[in-house]
Image (cartoon, rainbow, N blue to C red):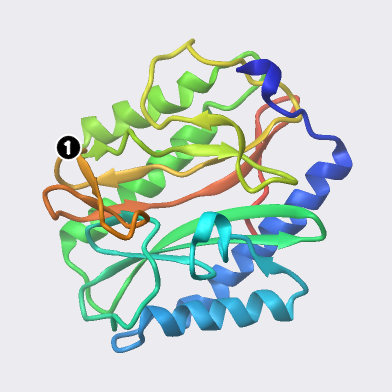
């Protein structure tokens, strides 16, 4: 696996950073619009227009047939939710996953938003998922291994009573939307490819209140928890530096 992971140049990393920063700006832009009554289609259109106004295009649009510009995954939807006519309700949580293609480079980030007043259980899940992402990023340093990310996330999630989606993970990113390696959010320390300075990839844990089992719906995109319980996700694009990890998708 290690030989197929592209080591990025400084110019590549700068390009990915600019695209990732734009993706982060999309999330900041859309946050005040995440209100009771707005449809996920409207959220999609607002993000689409913002991305285009900033000289980029939305990477998901048309990717392997995906019909929209972002993913909007509400409540029990784990990932890859397709924006539609659903209008947000008080107490919902929504994962907004944004990938931009700017000047030849992709940048990817995701955040979970609460709609109005959300339950304590939803707040706790969101906090724990953010912490899983941070703990995963902290494992990234030259000499470590990709399995370290998953091992740390899995332990933290399970110690706090949550489960981790195993079937989906992070991925390399750069001039292509998805590159090697696959970045699992479960695993064992010391396994997988070794981190090397210049690698760029996403970490994007999907954490469930209930069990880890998932189901793929008939649209062949939307993934839900099998037990119908809430799932949260946060994501950053990171680069391996000489001393650790740099988060590229922040502003």
> Residue 139, position in %: x, y?
52, 26
- Picture quadrant where residue 72 is located: bottom left
Q: Residue furthest bottom?
A: 37
> Residue 98, position in %: x, y?
54, 62
**Is residue 85 positioned above or below 218 on the image?**
below
Near-viewer residue (36 or 156): 36
> Residue 205, position in %: x, y?
40, 42
What is the secondary structure assignment of the residue under circle 1?
loop
The residue carrying mark 1 is 161
Left or right side of 22 for 138? left
- Picture quadrant where residue 202 is located: top right
Would you say residue 126 is visible in this rendering? no
Q: Residue at x 21, y 38 (%)?
A: 212
Q: Residues within 10 Å of mark 1 (few under 14, many from 20)?
A: some
Q: In which quadrant of the rendered image does the N terminus lie?
A: top right
Left or right side of 232 for 120? left
């Amino acid at each position: 696996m290690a030989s197929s992971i592209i080591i990025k140049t400084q110019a590549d990393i700068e390009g990915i950073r600019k695209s990732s920063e734009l993706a982060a700006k999309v999330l900041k832009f859309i946050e005040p619009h995440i209100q009771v009554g707005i449809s996920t289609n409207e959220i999609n259109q607002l993000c689409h227009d913002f991305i285009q106004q900033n000289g980029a295009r939305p990477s998901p649009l048309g990717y392997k047939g995906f019909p929209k510009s972002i993913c909007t995954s509400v409540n029990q939807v784990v990932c890859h939710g397709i924006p539609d006519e659903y209008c947000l309700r008080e107490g919902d949580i929504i994962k907004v996953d944004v990938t931009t293609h700017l000047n030849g480079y992709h940048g990817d980030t995701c955040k979970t938003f609460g709609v109005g007043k959300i339950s304590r259980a939803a707040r706790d899940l969101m906090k724990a998922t953010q912490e899983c992402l941070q703990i995963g990023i902290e494992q990234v340093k030259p000499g470590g291994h990709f399995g370290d990310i998953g091992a740390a996330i899995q332990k933290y999630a399970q110690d706090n009573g949550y489960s981790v989606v195993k079937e989906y993970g992070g991925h390399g990113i750069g001039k292509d939307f998805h590159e090697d390696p696959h970045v699992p959010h479960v695993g064992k320390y010391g396994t997988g490819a070794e981190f090397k300075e210049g690698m760029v990839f996403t970490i994007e844990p999907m954490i469930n209140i209930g069990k880890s089992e998932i189901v793929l719906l008939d649209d062949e995109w939307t993934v839900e928890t099998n037990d119908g319980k809430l799932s949260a996700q946060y994501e950053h694009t990171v680069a391996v530096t000489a001393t650790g990890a740099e988060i590229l998708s922040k502003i």
